[in-house]
Image (cartoon, rainbow, N blue to C red):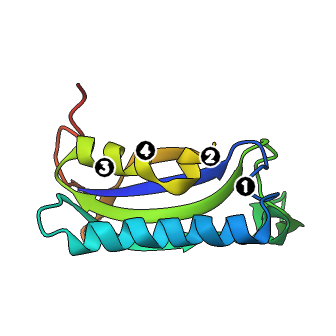
Amino acid sequence: MKYALLGYDSDGSLEELAPEDKRALHVGHRALHDEVTATASTSVSVIAHYRFRPPPLATTIRLGTDELITAEGPASKASEALRALYLLESDDHDAVLDLAGRLPAVQMGGIVEVWPLTEPDPQGRRRHGHESGPKRH
């Protein structure tokens, strides 16, 4: 099953980090990625990791009454800013949750949402990694 991990800066504190702390945060993410990639016994594969640019650089597009409307900034005005996206693959939901909890941003007060993904197939049907979804304990 594939998962998207969405990382949020819960209170803006990650954006306010000193440059050396930001570098340490990014080095920590890279080290965790390298650890997962190098460990043959792990049940989680990191497909990709992307960081988002600061929220004011986002553009929101909506359909108005008869035209597309664009606006600067993200659609959500929530206090949490979307900061990172991980794409993972695993048959072990608990291992994905464990990895999410070890992300350096979480250790520094950030939030991570874990979303199981459904892959579309060419015939338009939904395909699930596991038809029953992730196991909950």
Q: Position of residue 32 (x, y in %)?
A: 39, 65
Amino acid type shown at disc 3: Val
**Picture residue at 72% right of the left edge, 71% below the top:** 20
3D distance between C-alphas at marks 2 and 1? 8 Å
- For disc 3, the marked residue is 96
Q: Secondary structure at mark 3?
A: helix
Q: Are marks 2 and 1 in contact (CB under 8 Å)?
A: yes
Residue at 66 percent across and 56 percent down: it is 82
Q: Residue at x 83, y 59 (%)?
A: 64
Label 1: how many Cα within 10 Å (few below 14, some 14–19, many 20+): some
Q: CA distance from mark 2 to mark 3?
A: 17 Å
The reply to whether discs 2 and 3 touch (Cβ–Cβ < 8 Å) is no
**Given contact means CB atoms under 8 Å apart, are the residues at marks 4 and 3 in contact?**
no
Instruction: Name the disc covering residue 14, or none.
Output: 1
Earlier residue among tags 2 and 4 = 4
- Residue hosting label 4: 101
**Structural distance between the alpha carbons of marks 1 and 4:** 16 Å
In the image, 41: left or right of 64?
left
Indicate which disc, 2 or 3, sits on the residue closer to the N terminus.
3
Q: Amino acid at mark 2?
A: Gly
Q: Is residue 92 visible?
A: yes
Quadrant (top left/top right/bottom left/bottom right) for the C terminus: top left
Tag 1 secondary structure: loop
The amino acid type found where label 4 is placed reads: Gly
Mark 2 — residue? 110
Residue nearest the viewer, comparing 88 with 43:
43
